[in-house]
Amino acid sequence: FDENALTYASGLQLQKDGVWYNIPILPNALLVNVGDVMEIMSNGFFKSPIHRVVTNAEKERLSLVMFYTMNPEKEIEPLSELVDEKRPRRYRKTTTNDYIAQLFETFARGTLAIDTVKI
């Protein structure tokens, strides 16, 4: 039984290039997932991570998840200051309401909502 292995068996995993990686536990840490809206508004500079949480039969875990959503009619698009000839617009304009609808629809199919607004 390896005590150090449990440090990495936190349950949170991130996916990169189709591989799931365990994220180590950092005591008293606050993890902020910037999410899809930040990826769209930053024109791809910030990435919304593909993530999941898995159970750990060896160690108890407590997580608190909170979501923030903008006004349903708020338009979401890359900031004009982050779009130029060298870095063209990567996402089309949508509204919060339309994007959330896409999120639920694509989640049911096992695909990513952000892919529906990519140019």
Image (spheres, rainbow, N blue to C red):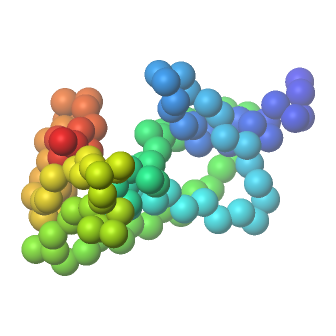
- Figure check: 116 above or below 41: above
In this image, 96 relative to 47: left or right? Answer: left
In this image, 48 relative to 53: left or right? Answer: left
Rendered image quadrant of residue 30: bottom right
- Figure check: 103 above or below 77: above
| Residue at 62% in and 56% down | 62
For the view shown, which residue lies furthest in the front direction? Answer: 85
| Residue at 49% in and 24% down | 17
- Specify whether residue 33 is in view: yes
| Residue at 42% in and 49% down | 48
- Figure check: 18 above or below 30: above
Closest to the observer, 109 or 82: 82
- Figure check: 67 above or below 52: below
Closest to the observer, 52 or 1: 52
Could you say where residue 117 lies in the image, as x and y percent from the top left? Answer: 18, 46
| Residue at 30% in and 59% down | 83
Closest to the observer, 50 or 10: 50
- Specify whether residue 59 is in view: no
In this image, 30 relative to 38: left or right? Answer: right
The quadrant of the picture occupied by the N terminus is: top right
Could you say where residue 13 lies in the image, as x and y percent from the top left? Answer: 57, 37
Could you say where residue 3 lies in the image, as x and y percent from the top left? Answer: 89, 34
Could you say where residue 4 lies in the image, as x and y percent from the top left? Answer: 87, 35
Closest to the observer, 82 or 108: 82
In this image, 31 relative to 39: left or right? Answer: right
For the view shown, which residue lies furthest in the bottom direction? Answer: 71
